[in-house]
Image: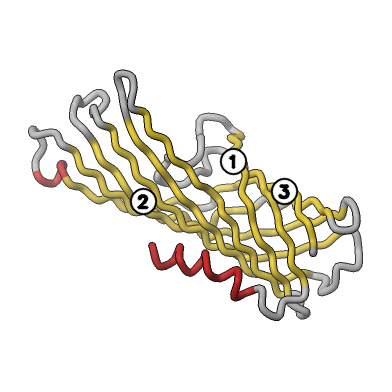
Amino acid sequence: MKNLFILLLLAPSLAAVGQKEIAVKLYSHATLFDARTLLGYDEPASEIVAFGGLAPALFFQNENGLYQEFELSRVYYKNVEEGSDPYEKSSLSLRYEAGFSLEKKRATNMQLRFGLSLRGYTYSYSNFTGGFDGYPIDQDGVGWIISMTPHLELNIIENLFLDFSPYLDIANFGVRREFDYNPNFVDEQVDSIDFLFAAFKPRLRAGLGWHF
C-alpha cells in the first residue's frame, strides 16, 4: 500500500508531459446512506447525507480526449491526550481516475466525462484506555475503492468551471488488524485480522476548477 501511495504522488508530474489540457480542482465530498470507507474513521456516517472535507485534485487530458485525475481525498490526524478517553487516530486517502471526454476540445460551455477510479486509503487508531473494556486497543488497516465516475462540467467564466460528479462505489475492500491488550482474551482475540467488503454505495461530489 505504501508503494501505491508513492506512485500516486509521483504520477501527476509524469502525466503532465505531453498533455493538451491541464486543470486544478477543489472538490467537496458527501456520502449517501453510509457510503463511507469500510474502516469507518475518515468520514461521518450518522446522517443520510454526510459532508466530508475538501479534496484538491490535478486533471490532465490529451488531444484524444483521454484524461487522468489525481486527488488527495483525505488527510486527517487527531491526538486527544486530555480527558477520560485519550486516543489517537489518523487517515490518508488518495484517488486515481482515468476516462474519456465526449468532446475532445473545450469548445462549449458544457462537457461530459466518464471514467473509473481507484481510491486507496489507510488509517490507524489507538485508544489508550480501551473505552468500555478498560484495556488499550490498537487498530490499523488499508482499503481500496473502485468507482464509476461521471462528470458534468459547466463553464462559469473563461477558465473557471463547476464540476458536478456524483459517483457509485462498485466495490469497497478493507483489511483491518486489531490488537487488544485485554489479558483475558485468547490469542485469536488479542491479535485479529478482519476482511471487509461492500458494494454499490453512492457518493456526491462537486467542485470548482481552473483550466490553464
Q: Residues within 10 Å of mark 2 (few under 14, many from 20)?
A: few
Q: Position of residue 152 (x, y in %)?
A: 78, 56
Q: Residue at image x 39%, y 47%?
A: 123
Pick whichever, 206 or 115, lies toward us.
Answer: 206
Chain-order first, disc 1 or disc 3: 1
Q: Which mark is residue 53?
A: 1
Chain-order first, disc 1 or disc 2: 1
Q: Position of residue 149 (x, y in %)?
A: 65, 59
Asked whether the residues under the numbered discs 2 and 3 touch, taking CB atoms below 8 Å apart as contact, a structural biologist would say no
Whether residue 180 sits left or right of residue 50 in the image: it is left
> Does 199 appear above or below 13?
above
Secondary structure beneath disc 2?
Answer: strand
Asked whether the residues under the numbered discs 1 and 2 touch, taking CB atoms below 8 Å apart as contact, a structural biologist would say no
Secondary structure beneath disc 3?
Answer: strand
Give the residue type at disc 1: Gly
Residue for badge 3 = 207
Residue for badge 2 = 196
> Does 179 appear above or below 112?
above
Q: Nearer the viewer, mark 1 or mark 2?
A: 1
Colouring chosen for the image of the structure: secondary structure
Give the residue type at disc 2: Leu
Q: Position of residue 107 (x, y in %)?
A: 91, 68
Q: Residues within 10 Å of mark 1 (few under 14, many from 20)?
A: some
How far, Cα to Cα, is label 2 from label 3? 30 Å
How far, Cα to Cα, is label 1 from label 2? 24 Å
How far, Cα to Cα, is label 1 from label 3? 12 Å
Q: Position of residue 94 (x, y in %)?
A: 52, 57
Whether residue 70 sits left or right of residue 144 in the image: it is right
Pick whichever, 105 or 72, lies toward us.
Answer: 72
Q: Which mark is residue 77?
A: none
